[in-house]
Amino acid sequence: MKRGAMQRRLFPVTLSVLIALGTGTQAWAHHSFGAAYDLNAPQITVKGTIAQVRLQNPHSWFFLDVKDETGKTVRWAFEAGTPSGMMRNGFKPGVIKQGVEVTIKGFRARDTTQNMGMLRELTTSDGKVYGMFGPQEGPGK
């Protein structure tokens, strides 16, 4: 077999393998919430100051500075829904700014050595409530 013919046959195989590897990596990287967070444990409530809000795919993140029992500031991270899902439900980028005091209710990470959780509900100091996918609507909200 000539070199050119062999290269033409190997190219589609090589390309297919590379595409399969790339797709598999993305699927593996996107986890289920149940795998990372203990949804059967009692919910946690964390009060602190927003350090950063990151609206990026695949999920949004809210980072809080929280005073621990010794008065030391520790960073907590809460994973939320997709940015597009949150915006479809009324959450607007920039609505919760750095320095705002909030209370977050959610589920703790299975790895309890990490200050991390899944956001179920975020309440601002003025009483506005946001859920995992944007503002909570309903009676009295």
Image (spheres, rainbow, N blue to C red):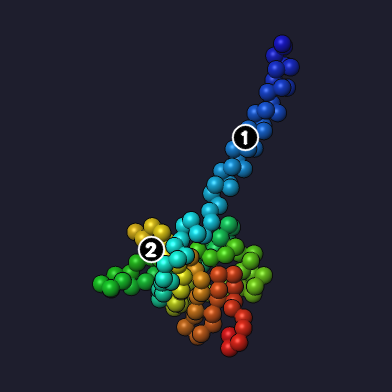
The three-letter code of the residue at mark 2 reads Asn
Labelled disc at residue 18 = 1
Label 1 – label 2 distance at C-alpha: 36 Å
Give left or right: position of 120 versus 87: left
**Amino acid type of the residue tagged 1 in the rendering:** Leu
Disc sitting over residue 48 in the figure: none
User: In percent of the image, x 41 and y 71: which residue is there?
Assistant: 42
Q: Which quadrant would the N terminus be assigned to in this image?
A: top right
Q: Disc 2 designates what residue?
A: 115
Assign the C terminus to one quadrant of the image.
bottom right
For residue 50, above or below residue 115: below
| Residue 95 x, y percent position in the rendering | 57, 75
Q: Position of residue 80 (x, y in %)?
A: 53, 65
Q: Is residue 80 above or below residue 22?
A: below
Q: For residue 22, which quarter of the picture?
A: top right
Q: Residue at x 47, y 83 (%)?
A: 125
